[in-house]
Amino acid sequence: MAAESAVERVDRLVINRPGAVVLAVLLVTVVFAVGLGQVSTESGTDEFTTDVPAQDALDDVNREFAEPFATSTTGTTLIQRESNVLAKPALVRMLAAQEALAERDGLRVTGTTSPAAAVARQLDPAARTPEDQADAVRRATPAEIDRAVRRAAQRPGFASSLSNDFNAESATASAAIGSVTHRLPGGDGITAVQLESARVVDATAGQRISVFGSGIVNDEFSRVIFDSLAIVVPAAALFILLFLVVAFRDPFDLLLGVVSLVLAVVWTFGFTGLVGIPFSQLLIAVPPLLLAVGIDFGIHSVNRYREELGRTDRDGAMTVTLRQLLVAFFIVTGTTVIGFAANGTSSLGPIRDFGLVAAVGITFTFVLFGVFLPAAKLSLDRLRERVGVPQFSQSALGGEGSLLGRVLTSGVFVARRAPRAFLALVVLLSVVSGAYATGVSTSFQQEDFLPPEETPDYLEELPEPFRPGEYTVTATLNFLENNFESGNQQSVTVYVQGPMERDYALEAIHRAGRDPPAGFVTDDRRTDSRSPATVISSYADQDPEFAALVARNDRNDNGIPDDNLGEVYDYLAASPAAPQLEGVLADDRRSAQVVYTAEGDVPQDELAAAGAEIADSQRYEATATGQTIVFQSVSDIILRSALTSLALALALTALFLVVIYRLLTGYASLGLVNLVPIVLTVAGLAGAMRLFAIPFNALTATILSITIGLGIDYSVHVVHRFADEYEQRELFDALERTVRGTGGALTGSMLTTVTGIGVLVLAITPILGQFGLLTGLSILLAYLASVFVTPSVVVVWAGARERLGLAG
């Protein structure tokens, strides 16, 4: 048989030339170590939105419509917080900060705006630069400033840049927003620019003014990756080391296990560097996953080797170990790779990358723990024997007569007494859990990837260099939402494509804003929006000549021109309103954007549905977009990805197991027996997600297929060991020997990996904590199902075969 031939060749290589195996692995490690130096990082939400239709529409909007001072990827926001930001000293501070930024050549500042600048222009209309504006404020008396504030308050946009407690009469407000724009095409270098801007502003205005923008967010996204790794990796290593000490009870075996784990991580991320896959927040979860499988393989190898040492010599013990475990490792690797690779069906690039890297990493783990570790173990034992280094504990976990062995055989006890009743109860609980899980929500938002507003106390108590840095983005976002009207609102952009000079073009946009879906901000049953129609209406109120032009071309006297739209646009393009028109009408006048204002508390899915409805009401082809719509689109894709990858992983795993067990044991139906514990685990885990209010998000969407990949590890070891024992023993003797021997190794593996992966709950970002909790829970459930439920499944399977006379 091909499988047996391959195992025999590996067996001969490990036993006859273990030194060559070790040397070859070390040489390959050197190659992958080169790749480690080429690993780049990628963080934030942008990586998830590539190729999403709503994002494509938003990119088109950003490319075609650009207002000179609109907030964009090249804009920096200045947030001022004082007892009164409209008092004379506070106004001077804001203008001085903007002046300092404008004078710094490297920041490439093209313009600044702020309430302070607006007040200064009321005091001196000729003051155009921050320096002149600051001088105008310094010359003014407090009474003159108060009057200037009241005049500025009558102009559009002034109040929106001030906190909700703004009082025009008393000229007071506790917070203000200023903006600085930079000449950075495409936003390139914005992170460096905003970090430098923060240093300049801090030196000028101290803590009263803070810098915020996409660059600050990106920097925090990146820092949280490394800070999380700095906490999680050492904690995982500590827990793993402690449990490996208990499992191996031999410093040399412990060293081999740790070295093999390190090599698995080096190989995997060296591979990502060589092929150019960037390290994202999702990939933080890969090292713990590799540790989970690697620890399992390592404990099984050493435990099985020790079992056989009591019956034969070292070479004979290693031969039996390899011939039994290489097949089990191959089955585990195949099913685990299927589970991870099923994420390749996702249309989200980061999830596909995660599936690929995890699948490759598991394959590397199979090679290292299936070939390298046995070879190194055999070489080391031979060396120890030659030089007289004493052997430490060589007993296997879960041995006969031990307390653990008695606990593990309780599943066999139940299988002897009432296997069908026990299975019926377990299946019923799983069905209930699966039905309950249909209420699991989905989520994709920027906050998933950001650290919490307040770092937990236990993280603050960590010593350097493990203590995380200072994070401000979440607190800033919450401050803006709670203190500014714009923070309590959302927007939906509708990208309208069609000839906008047709007579009915503006009327169609105008009608679509009448009686909008619930959730949009309205005034007299009309949406609060910005479009070519609103720009025309607004400028008509300021320019009588233009108002007359509009009236001449307005058939139904509703303020919206129906004729000669080209002439109306031409007039606007030559007027002071040209920048506003350019922000909503494309240069070729064949597309427009309509920006609708929505209430801030409208749920993301409801707003997306409302946006789609109002887009459908447009006469021309129209697409709803904007950050909320894009994020909801990603959220929908996440749910589809989770369900698709789960279905594919289950189907392919079932097929793989049926075929492999047929080839290896002659019992094809054992493949289905192998699958039962993992189906129960998936149902239980899905129910737990709803119970703990954990949604499907960018990372937890992978958890169901990962549960198959990792959970199958436990049931494979139990079922495959049983198949071997069943060839030589009666049913219950085979089961008892299986759960004592393999169950002992599984217990050590479970404890080590649950704690090793569970330390992700210490990660700074919520999304990683949720993933760590779910992954640890999935391993625990898979262990319990494999050790305590599988015996009953096997007994029912054996009874069915006997009654039906099945051969396989």
Image (spheres, rainbow, N blue to C red):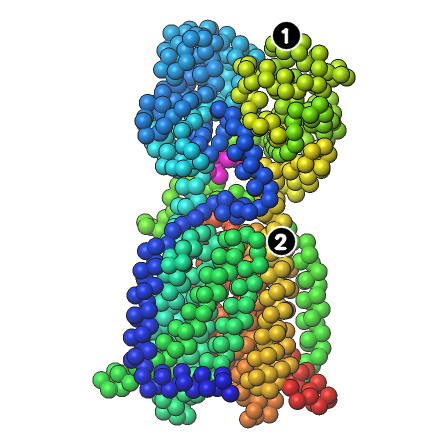
Image quadrant in which you'd find residue 702? bottom right
Residue 257 horizontal side relative to residue 638, left or right:
left
474 in magenta = yes
> At label 1, which amino acid type do we have?
Pro
> Compared to 613, does 778 lie above or below?
below
692 in magenta = no
Q: Which residue is mark 2?
A: 639
Distance between the Cα atoms at labels 2 and 1?
54 Å
- Residue 538 x/y as whole percent: 62, 16
Query: Looking at the figure, which quarter contains the C terminus?
Result: bottom right
Q: Can residue 226 be seen at all in this image of the molecule? A: yes
Residue 544 numbered tag: 1
Q: Please tell me whether mark 2 sits on a helix, a strand or a loop.
A: helix
Residue appearing at x 55%, y 66% in the figure:
339
Between tags 2 and 1, which lies in front? 1
> Compared to 167, does 273 lie above or below?
below
Point out the stretch of residues depicted in magenta. Answer: 473-478
